[in-house]
Every structure is written in C-alpha cells, then in structure tokens.
Image (tube, grey):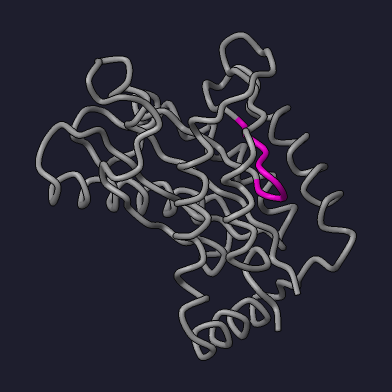
Amino acid sequence: MKRFAGSIALASAIAVTGCSTINPYTGEKQTSKATSGAAIGAVAGALIGIATSDSAKERKERALAGAGIGAVTGGGVGYYMDVQEAKLRQKLEGAGVSVTRDGENIILNMPGNLTFATDSTDVKPSFDPVLEAVAEVLKEYKSTMIQVAGHTDSTGGDRYNLLLSQQRAQAVSNKLSAFGVEQVRLDPVGFGETQPIASNSSASGREQNRRVELTLLPYTK
C-alpha cells in the first residue's frame, strides 16, 4: 500500500541526524541540529492525516489517484528529491527562506516577519512571489506531499497561539492552492508554541520561532 513518506521509522531516523541548510542571507552551507527536532514533529504531524487508520489511507490514496498523482518508486526517490531540492534552492536564493534537506524530506522555513504582519493571518502581498515560485516547483513534482505547519513564539496564551498558527498555515496553504498546487497534496496544521527552534527568552529567539514550515515528503509505495 502506498504510504506518505514511507513510515514513522523515517521520522525516527531524523532524530539522529543534523540538517544541511543554506543560509538565506549569506548563501553559505551550514548544519543546524536545532531544526532536527522540529522536523521530527513536522514529519509526524504530516503523517496524521493518512496514517491514523487504513480507511484514512485508502481515502487519501483514492483522492490522489483521482487527481492523477502517482507514487515515486524504489530507488528513484532520492534522485526525485535531489532534483526538486536543487530547483527550490535556485528559485529561493535571496528570498529569506532556508532550504533544509533531512533524509528524503525537504523543509522550507519561512520566517514570520516575511510572511505575516504582527497578529495578522493574511499573507503579506510582498511574499506572494516567493510562494508562487515554490508552487511552480511543486506543480512540476506532483508526487510530493506538502505539510504546511504554522508555529508561534511563547508570547500570548496557548489557545491564541494555536489558533494563530492554524490560521497562518491555512492561509499559506490557500495561497499555494491558488497558485495551482492540488489541495489533496496540502496538509495545513498549526503547532502553536510547542515546537520552538530557538529560546523564547530572547527577542531573536522568538523571531526565529515565529515561522511557517513547509515539509515536502515524497509519496511512495
């Protein structure tokens, strides 16, 4: 049976590896283990929609098949994601969005200061070209599933932060859909303040935690 990113074991494997990241400001390659924990949560969250029961998987698979979306097979997965990663790095150079490769998954970290105004759930018009560029690649690589995860810092109440993160994830998902990415491939989810990648005790840390992450997962058999 086809599976979303293979299995939960893939998420476990991420825990013991660092992430290869291109700094969006310097263009230099760097290793960030801080994002690895967040990646685990993102991958696990992306599995929720179709891995909770056999019937859920079957419904998802039928929807994907109905949209003409097939799985990537066997040894072709790595190359499929390699080429996709290279195109995303090229498209997003200088955009302020980091591209992280973790196993067979690709994570796009979109800082909150670029995507949304304070307390707003409307994507900034200035960020539309970035999302359109991402959508261009995603439309070419249709066997890629996308979790759109919203994250906040710890300022404010838990419920407020959770709702804000959910609404922002949905807003980004809606934009990608408007730019032509099939809705069945998109899984918007909000994590509130539960998955920080930096300390909330400093302004710079809180700024890093306010983000939307796109986790791209190959749809495999």
Q: Which residue is painted at 68% across and 81% down in the image?
A: 65
As rendered, which of 8 and 74 lies closer to the eye? 8
Q: Which residue is painted at 35% across and 31% down in the image?
A: 124
Q: Principal SS element in the magenta part?
A: strand
Q: Is residue 129 left or right of residue 205?
A: right
Residue sitting farthest toward the front: 16
- In this view, 188 is above or below 27: below
Q: Which residue is painted at 33% across and 41% down in the image?
A: 151
| Magenta span | 99-105
Q: Which residue is painted at 56% across and 55% down in the image?
A: 146
Q: Where, by quadrant of the figure, is residue 161 drawn?
A: top left
Q: Position of residue 166 (x, y in %)?
A: 29, 53
Q: Is residue 193 left or right of residue 209?
A: left
Where, quadrant-wise, is the C terminus in this rendering?
A: bottom right
- In this view, 25 is above or below 70: above
Q: Position of residue 140 (x, y in %)?
A: 74, 52
